[in-house]
Each structure stands twice: as structure tokens, then as C-alpha cells.
Amino acid sequence: ADFRARSARPEDGGALAVVTLILCTRGRRIGVDRLDTRQQVYDLLQDRLKVDGTSLLGAELLWSPGSGGLTEFAVKERFPEMHALL
């Protein structure tokens, strides 16, 4: 997958970041085992926006790398399960 072609902007120098959102909630949420399209990601995030304050037990946002950016090669090496969205 060519992540850079889908996200490159002249000002970012081709740097990429991987962001993981972890939510702990009460109640059932839509579950997925794979996200292949931008629409699937959008739908999943829309579902997560419905979590109200009484249902949210905890949240964590993981950002890799902590500073700077990753090359496309580094993303593929560190996160082999990832693929570009259609």
C-alpha cells in the first residue's frame, strides 16, 4: 500500500503518524475486525461519538512516533497489519 500517495502534503515532508484511539465503555458498540474504506472508518467514529459521559469509563490516545514522523517503510515494518484505505 502506498500511504504517502494518499496523504502527502508539501509541508509535512512525507512524514506519517499512526494514531490509536482506545475507549472503555459500558454497553455494546459496533465491532469490526477490519477497516477497508474511509466510509467504514467514518461510520465507526460516528458510532463512537454517541458514547455519553455516563457510558465512557476511560480513554487513551496512542501516537506513534512521539515526535517527528514515520516513513512509509517504517510504518510497514512496525505495523505490518495496517493497509491503506480505499
Image: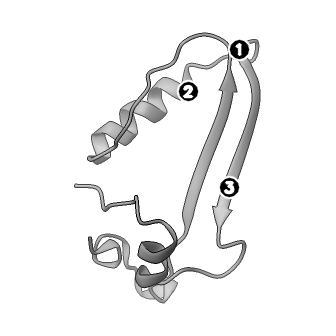
Task: Provide the residue designation for mark 1.
Answer: 55
Front position in the image: 82 or 11: 82
Report helix, strand or loop for mark 3.
strand
Calculate the distance from the C-alpha at mark 3 to the C-alpha at mark 2.
Answer: 18 Å
- Looking at the rendered image, the disc whose residue lies closer to the viewer, 3 or 2, is 3
User: Which residue is pictured at 69% across the width and 49% down the height?
Assistant: 61
Q: Is residue 50 above or below residue 8?
A: above
User: Which residue is pictured at 27% across the width and 47% down the height?
Assistant: 36
Calculate the distance from the C-alpha at mark 3 to the C-alpha at mark 1.
Answer: 21 Å
Left or right of 5 in this view: 60 = right
Report helix, strand or loop for mark 2.
helix
Q: Give amino acid for label 3.
A: Leu
Q: Is residue 20 above or below residue 77?
A: above
Q: Give amino acid for label 1.
A: Ser
Q: Is residue 25 above or below residue 9?
A: above
Q: Earlier in the sequence, mark 1 or mark 2?
A: 2
- Looking at the rendered image, the disc whose residue lies closer to the viewer, 1 or 2, is 1
Task: Provide the residue designation for mark 3.
Answer: 62
Task: Provide the residue designation for mark 2.
Answer: 49
User: Which residue is pictured at 55% across the width and 19% down the height?
Assistant: 50
Q: Identify the residue at the far left of this view.
A: 86
Quadrant of the rendering where the C terminus is positioned: bottom left
